[in-house]
Image (cartoon, rainbow, N blue to C red):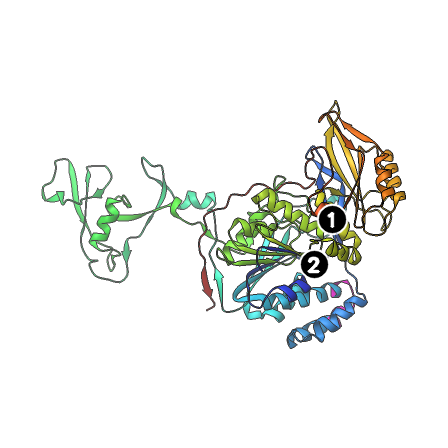
Amino acid sequence: MTNTLYYGDNLDILRQHVPDESVDLIYLDPPFNSNASYNVLFKERSGEESPAQIKAFTDTWEWTQESERVFEQEIIMHPATPPNVKDMITAFREFIGRNAMMAYLVMMTPRLVELRRVLKPTGSIYLHCDPTASHYLKLLMDAIYGARYFRSEISWRRTNAHNDAKQGRRQYGNVRDSILFYSKGNRWNWNWQYTEYDKEYVDAFYKFMEQGSGRLYQKGDLTAAKPGGDTSYEWRVKRPRGEDWEADLTNEYLHPIEGWEYKGVLPYSGRYWAYSRDGMTVMAEEGRIAYNRNGTPRYKRYLDEMPGVPLQNDWTDIRPASPSESLGYQTQKPQALLERIIEASSNEGDVVLDPFCGCGTAVAAAEKLKRKWIGVDVTHLAVALMKNRLKTGFNIVPGVDYQVVGEPADVGSALALAEQDRYQFQFWAMSLLEAFPREQSKRGADRGIDGVIHFIDGPRRSTRKAVVQVKSGKVSSPLIRDLKGTVDRENAALGLFITLEDPTRDMRTEAVSAGFYHSEVWQRDYPKVQIRTVQDLLTGNTFDLPPHPSMYQPAQRVRRPEGKQSTLEEAG
């Protein structure tokens, strides 16, 4: 299934939903074992980043009983794991020991094996990593994909130099990431990418400017080492005395005009013309020939017709995601980086897979470039961000333009999610309102607030808020009384209560007793405390609220370019 977002563990998703040899290009930007927590920043009503943040994932690893289970059952004992990969991961454990790095490599190994399975024979994989684990990942990739299929290690300069010396840093600054590029076989999709020539190169080689058009060009050789047909003729040229030469296409030299010079030009000694007389005549008529001072014809190679410098593996020209592009996801990569990779290694209509898709940059780049795509993430927060990005960037919605798998579609699946992970259930419920989820300072201690919605109201058009509480278990009227107290304590305008179970009559009575909030901007009353079930929200019976913006930062609207087909590159 393509053009699909999956919620869940990517190992399970790959094994259950992605067929063998069905993907043309894989890009993955997994956690780097950086021992850090990464947050999502939400925008305030002013558009500035909120000081409140939600932890998207924790890139902190430790060797646990689960690590041991995965090592034994998902790698060593699993029939899909090649013998050399089992040998490699076993050697890693002997060398590295049972520690955080080994836990990270154990997590990555079965996923990299599955990714190779789903890759087409002409497909490629790009693994984005940093110096923390790149050397181990390179050995692991060599074992899984084959060292002979390693194509390049791309160095991407992701940031400018850091001034860490004042903080006592006693080593070089890290400003680059590595991207390991492998193909699955000897033939792989490839389309050369080019970068602009630098000014020094242009000044040195494109020194001539065409009169009238202003186009810069350099002069190219029109001779060849070997003959081939009509290539030994005399090329006739003419000019007013002391001025520039031009082609004498009408043999004017047979009836010369006073004040003009005429001559015939032969190729250099031992050389031949590279084109027939007819071919040279066509080029002269098109204005593609310039002349040296001695009348020798030279080909005009225009700067604006050159593709640029073939892209090398040192990428310094793509900056980090700009403020206008940023969605508040700390590990977000610039879309230009993903567009370059996708354009180089896939065709329109090909399938692009990102198994750690985060805020969905690879998905957005694939959608823009008219590729099919599959995105997988283990958090509902990331899935909600991606859905918002696709809506604001491309005006496409789930269920119509693409599918979302693993996200609750009914009360039964919502209950299953709540039983599996009630915090992911809360994130999912918040996404139904496009509300800002509130991170808990301590598991189980939410202080009565699971999320917040901001809106503008009052005579001074100040920021007001509605606090949201989500319950997946048993509910009763004391919970509504507590919500009323939270509304008062937080100086909130409204209190919103989401429940999986149907509310009792006492709960509804308690909510009604809270009265109304009067909006001066919209000149109407809103029930101050409102209750909705998950079933209500799934069927469109949402809360009665003043107009408010989504708390997700909108993506830039995208204009799709005209595409071009890549070719199959073959190893020599």
Q: Position of residue 380 (x, y in %)?
A: 71, 52
Q: Position of residue 324 (x, y in %)?
A: 61, 39
Magenta stretch in the rendered image: 93-102
> For mark 2, what is the residue?
8
Residue at 51% of width from left, 55% of height from top? 312
What is the spatial separation of the Cα atoms under label 1 and label 2, in whole angstroms?
22 Å
**Amino acid at dot 2:** Gly
Marks 1 and 2, the one that precedes in the sequence: 2
* Closer-to-camera residue (213/166): 213
Q: Is residue 160 visible?
A: no
In the displayed orientation, state which residue is furthest to the front. Answer: 505
244 sits to left or right of 108: left
Q: Position of residue 130 (x, y in %)?
A: 66, 56
> For mark 1, what is the residue?
535
Query: Of helix, strand and loop, which one carries label 1?
Result: helix
- Quarter-of-image position of residue 372: bottom right
Look at the magenta stretch and give its main secondary structure. helix
